[in-house]
Image (cartoon, rainbow, N blue to C red):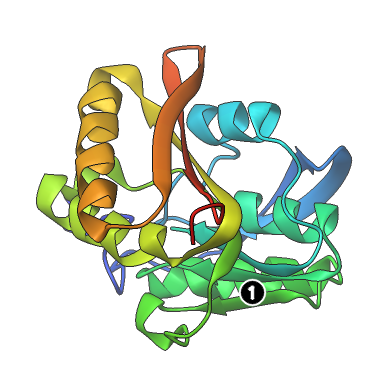
Amino acid sequence: MSSSHYFSASPDTPFERRGLQVELADRSVTVSTAGGIFSPEGVDKGTAVLLKHVPDPAPSGHLLDIGCGWGPIALTMAMRSPGATVWAVDVNERSRTLCAENAAALGLENVRVMSPDEVPSAVRFDTIWSNPPIRVGKKVLHELLELWLPRLADDAEAWLVVQKNLGADSLLTWMRSMLAAVGEDFTADRPETDKGFRLLRVSRSAEQR
């Protein structure tokens, strides 16, 4: 049994690419996936729920996909907002390779794929979308969200999709507490539930700043 997980930095399973036809941003596209990453068989149910319900990303500025995998969220953002820069981050080296290859194959020159620590600290994000890696454990997940959510730009939104039975409601409670401690104008709510998944939204207002 392999000890590799989709949140491993370097999966120890063979890197064997395979083509996959999926629909992203109302387009039928062919992408490459492989074992050792998250959801190599296609667009997973949670990501599909997220992409179904989120409003369009900001048309310009900086957009972020936390935990990009082979790229369904980042590629969708890039297609919907060609005038924006999409930052696709993942700790999994294989995921980053595939996401970059898929962006290049689709001619999406506005996608930057990198590890989390390579993103310049000064960048603020006009839209964040994520199907966060719940199975990394609560401590690591909280550290991940503490790193990225406070980096929302003014009047920007982050959208997360979390399975209801994997702690979506308790995560929302924690996010509210964490963001209140940041001392800025953040709100967090749960605007949608679909197929057992919660959509969690974090908004940052500039009204009182």
- Considering depth in this image, is 35 or 190 the residue closer to the camera? 190
As drawn, the residue found furthest toward the front would be 208
Q: Quadrant of residue 56?
A: top right
39 lies above or below 31 = above
Residue at which label 1 appears: 100
Amino acid type, residue under disc 1 in the picture: Ala
Considering the numbered disc 1 on the image, is that residue within a helix, a strand or a loop?
helix
Q: Position of residue 93 (x, y in %)?
A: 41, 75
Q: Residue at x 86, y 42 (%)?
A: 28
Q: Residue at x 37, y 68 (%)?
A: 92
Left or right of 125 on screen, residue 85: right
Q: Position of residue 147 (x, y in %)?
A: 31, 66
The mark total stands at: 1
- Considering depth in this image, is 71 or 171 the residue closer to the camera? 171
Q: Would you say residue 68 is visible in this rendering? A: no
Q: Residue at x 43, y 58 (%)?
A: 67
- Considering depth in this image, is 151 or 69 the residue closer to the camera? 151
Q: Would you say residue 182 is visible in this rendering? A: yes
Left or right of 82 on screen, residue 166: left
Q: Quadrant of residue 140?
A: bottom left
Question: Dot 1, crowdedness within 10 Å: few (<14), some or many (≥20)?
Answer: many
196 lies above or below 119 = above
Q: Position of residue 109 (x, y in %)?
A: 81, 78
As drawn, the residue found furthest toward the left would be 139
Q: Residue at x 55, y 40 (%)?
A: 41
Q: Quadrant of residue 198?
A: top left
